[in-house]
Amino acid sequence: MKILVHGINFHPEPTGIGKYSGEMCERLAAMGHEVRVVTAPPYYPGWKITEGWTNGYTRSRWRGVDVWRAPLWVPARPSGLKRVLHLLSFSVAALPLLARQLLWRPDVVMVVAPAVVCAPWAWLTARLSGARAWLHVQDFEVDAAYQLGLLNSGGLRRKLVTGIERWLLQRFDRLSTISHRMLDRARDKGVAEERLVYLPNWVDDQAITRLTHRSSYRDELGLSDDTVVALFSGTMGGKQGLELLPEVARQLAATHPQLMLVLCGSGVVKPQLEAQCQGLTNVRMLPLQPAERLNELLGMADIHLLPQHPGAADLVMPSKLSGMLASGRPVVTTSHPGTELERVVGRCGRVVSPGDADAFAQALRELADDAPRRDELGTAARHYAEQHLAQSSVLKRLEVCLLACANHSTSGVELPMDHQHTGGV
């Protein structure tokens, strides 16, 4: 089967959407399929072209995948309008590369959103080449942009934009997304049930394990055995609600000096975090770490931190959560009752109201003081990852769905893992 994947992010960072796109394509190629990717040069999460890469048209081979890259404009300080122009620049620049794929005649054209601005051209490429069109939604970026205030919420303009989005989503032969609540939102947008596929963010549960030895990061950071590490690792962007953490650290400094917050990653809000945490001895900041050290990094944690912006609830499912769960450590997150994030983390960690620094700090105190409970919740987290998010089973079922899609069949559409909202840990 020939599979063409189109998306702006592809394998540049150890976590996030690019990582999942890369792993998916690599595994499909290893299964014997011909896989091509039309994407951009690596630039995220630092919002600058990664050192050693050219912001131009290139073609390369990566782990059995044929990768075509198109240039794009990368704003140094992304705002709502600049983000839109940034995405549009890639969408337009990628058109010649998509046109060249028509002669290749793929069986399935899959576009990974964000960015949804890539979706129209991917759909057109599928139709002109006789392929099936598949849209994979990592987050509903239009809804998130309005709810997070990145775009002006003017009534008429918003109705127009969301109307176009609804029309576009309904055009694809398959629409997959990463949580059941997001599937519900796709249904609300008019996508037919037989076109929906549940495709959760998987984790390589052989590479990310429950670390039983002392992490090398503890030695490098000079942390004692009795230091309780609360770790945030990932993109430091506007959807994370990270502004909560400096206040949480201040509250914990007096009562729990043995509790160390380690904030690892990069992104647009990192300078603000560094300024707010200046002078706090219970906070350590780390840059984005190499992918090959991810298991050691996650295993350094006694507790994982997953604050979320309240406006992003059920519009996104944090990609970093799968690694946290696989590492066998409890998670503290912020979420409203009834969200999928609350349902999953509620069984293997603590869930508090978004923006509530007092409750977040109290949850960390309770877990820091109760090692047996941390171990119990960590065991539950690891079990959930193994049962529902294991890379090998998710991607094998994806292959079945892709083959069914290419053959114009509705059989094998569902990925029946944790398919009932009550699925336990």
Image (tube, grey):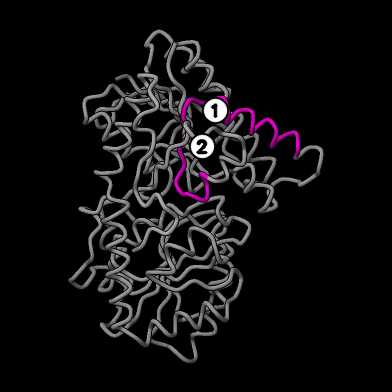
The quarter in which the C terminus is drawn is bottom left
Left or right of residue 359: residue 149: right
Residue at 30%, 83% in the rendered image: 371
- On the image, the x and y values in percent for residue 52 come to 38, 37
- Give 247 or 169, whichever is nearer the viewer: 169
**Amino acid identity at mark 2:** Ala
Q: Is residue 137 above or below residue 6?
A: below
Magenta stretch: give its range. Answer: 159-183
Quarter of the image with the N terminus in it: top left
Residue drawn 37% across and 42% down? 20
> Which picture quadrant has residue 166?
top right
Query: Residue 409 has which mark?
Result: none
Give the residue at mark 2. Answer: 113
Dot 1 and dot 2 residues touching (CB under 8 Å): yes
In magenta stretch: residue 163: yes
The local crowd at label 2, few if under 14, some if 14 to 19, many if 20 or more residues have their Cα within 10 Å, is: many
Upstream in sequence: badge 1 or badge 2: 2
Q: Specify few, some or many for label 1: CA neighbours under 10 Å numbering under 14, 14-19, or 20 or more.
A: many
In the depicted view, which residue is nearer to us: 117 or 57?
Answer: 117
Name the amino acid type tagged 1: Ala
Magenta span: predominant SS is: helix
**Residue found 44% across the figure and 80% down from its top:** 364
328, above or below 188, in the image: below
